[in-house]
Image (cartoon, rainbow, N blue to C red):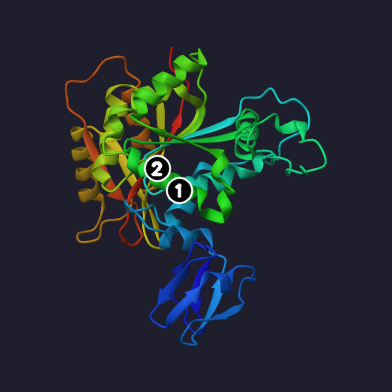
Amino acid sequence: MLLREKKDTHDGRLVKLQASKSTGTHLGIVQHADIIGRQPRQIIQSSKGASYRIHDPTLAEYVRLTPRLVTPIYPSDANLIVSLFDINVDRPSAGLNTDPPLEILEAGTGHGALTLHLSRAIHAANPPIPRAPAYSGSEDGPEDAVYLGESVSDLQHSYLESWKQSRRAILHTLDISPKYSQHAKKIVEGFRHGMYAANVDFHVGDVSDWISKQRAARRTQQPFLSHVFLDLPNPTHHLPNVAPVLHVNGLLAVFNPSITQIAECVEAIREQKMPYLLEQVVELGAGTVREWDVRAVKPRATLQKSSTEQTSAPSGNRSQDSETEQAARDGELEAALNKGKEEEEKWAMVCRPKVGQQVIGGGFLGLWRRMEQSS
């Protein structure tokens, strides 16, 4: 529940309600018992007579106000990332569905902010979670045989494990730190009574090791991931291992605070001829998304381009390259990449913002599409 002063428009205070507890504020103590049973937007009084309005926190408010161990991916950026994945799910059908489920891997759970946003995006694909029947024993009648000596919590756990086998959309989220993973799990379970938690499987460890174990457990070499999100300090180490388990046309997203780290991914994919096609690189920030041009080019071609621009453009006024010229250069680059031998000249990286957009900080997101493996 979110507590906010009646005439205050600031974020307020996030409160986990317990009947015997209270929350202290600079305007007095608020008893949780006074909140329980109330509806959103109703007014309660503190011990000093101050008026507080109660709210159901939005997902954005919840992410911002929950205690954190690491910096979260903020709601505006998380919403954009989910949008770029273009996730489209349908309600589960009543009949038998033999199609494989939608599976997404998030490597770098962190605070669990993106985890919640992704889980919300896939939530509609899964059937409702069955609930254990209410216990109805009495002193005069026999004990309900359905329990077979199991506790209610054990029975609910059994129902949940059985339900997980029928999921049509699964989010695997992995973090190298057990501490961060456990904290993120609590964050996910704490939103709206854990309504999105069952869509998520939490894992701890190295992403390449996790992929190897999954392939062994599934006893198949076929891809099983629809999308992959990497928020890691060394994503280039894992790109070769991700490719075999990512469906053709699936998206690989790499999030990093530095554009040079995205450039390293571009270079590693080119050098190792990995089956990824770069779709776009965007700079994330507060209210602004700026697209970047990140490509590998030959220095000789760069010099020729510079010479052409100097002779064709007026002094002190560099004109933007036409789309035709850009496409021609990209075509030459693609042709060079398709050659079976490496040229002696070294490649250089072009990293520049697309023309006509403002700079407002944030991280960088690279998006690659999984291609067919060349024979």
Residue 274 can be seen in this image: no
- Left or right, 10 with reference to 54: left
Specify the amino acid type for callout 2: Gln
Vertical order, 50 against 113 (above or below): below
Q: Which mark is residue 308?
A: none
Q: Residues within 10 Å of mark 2 (few under 14, many from 20)?
A: some
Q: Please give the residue where the numbered disc 2 appears in the rendered image.
A: 182
Marks 2 and 1, Cα distance to the nearest angstrom? 6 Å
Q: Nearer the viewer, residue 191 or 362?
A: 191
- Left or right, 123 with reference to 52: right
Question: In the rendered structure, are the residues bearing label 2 and label 1 in contact, judged by CB atoms less than 8 Å apart?
Answer: yes
Percent x, y for residue 20?
51, 65
Q: Residues within 10 Å of mark 1 (few under 14, many from 20)?
A: some
Specify the amino acid type for callout 1: Lys
Q: Which mark is residue 186?
A: 1
Q: Nearer the viewer, residue 122 or 292?
A: 122
Residue 107 can be seen in this image: yes
Q: Residue at x 53, y 54 (%)?
A: 191
Vertical order, 79 against 128 (above or below): below
- Left or right, 146 with reference to 234: right
Q: Quadrant of the C terminus?
A: top left
Q: Nearer the viewer, residue 60 or 363?
A: 60
Residue at the extreme right of the image, as rendered: 141
Vertical order, 191 against 156 (above or below): below
Q: Residue at x 82, y 39 (%)?
A: 141
Q: Residue at x 51, y 68 (%)?
A: 2
Percent x, y for residue 250?
50, 31
Q: Residue at x 30, y 55 (%)?
A: 319
